[in-house]
Amino acid sequence: QVQLVESGGGSVQAGGSLRLSCVASGYTVNNYCMGWFRQAPGKEREGVARLGRYGTTIYADSVKGRFTISRDNAKNTLYLQMNSLKPDDTAMYYCARSSSTSCPLSSGLFAGWGQGTQVTVSS
């Protein structure tokens, strides 16, 4: 069964950190471009970061220098380390995979979405 399960969200104060995890089953994460996206209430889903098959990364400008995407091939898991969190980072966070060769950070090119994990940052 092809599935992604996110975890690690929670409530933190501004300046705090969280690490999100996304465990994949039914396929191997390092055979795909993997991405993190987020959606706040009333807003469209936006790309946060993506990790290509060969390790290249793309980050949204809003998270550059604060967030780090990585994967553990042995655990078949994708991570998002989030530091210096801001209230604007509050959203539901999702992971997904893409078969696109260039793999731009565009939600339309990703599929197999997980159920999401909520991140809430208070000021």
Image (cartoon, rainbow, N blue to C red):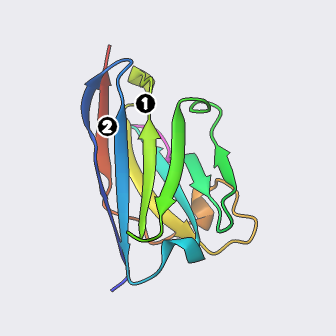
From this view, report whether residue 14 is shown above or below residue 59.
Answer: above
* Residue sitting at x 36%, y 47%: 20
Q: Which residue is mark 1?
A: 89
Magenta stretch: dominant secondary structure:
loop
Q: SS for tag 1?
A: helix
Query: Number of labelled discs?
Result: 2
Residue type at mark 1: give it.
Asp
From this view, report whether residue 28 is shown above or below residue 89.
Answer: below
Is residue 41 shown to the viewer in this render?
Answer: no
Is residue 102 shown to the viewer in this render?
Answer: yes
**Residue 119 numbered tag:** 2
Query: How far is the residue under mark 2 from the one under mark 1?
Result: 7 Å
Q: SS for tag 2?
A: strand
* Residue sitting at x 58%, y 77%: 31
Q: Is residue 53 magenta?
A: no
Residue type at mark 2: give it.
Val
Residue in the foreground of this view, choosing between 19 and 62 = 19
Q: Which residues are magenta?
A: 42-47
Contact flag, marks 2 and 1 (Cβ < 8 Å): yes
The reply, left or right, for residue 30 in relation to residue 16 is right
* Residue sitting at x 32%, y 25%: 121
Residue in the foreground of this view, choosing between 16 and 91 = 16
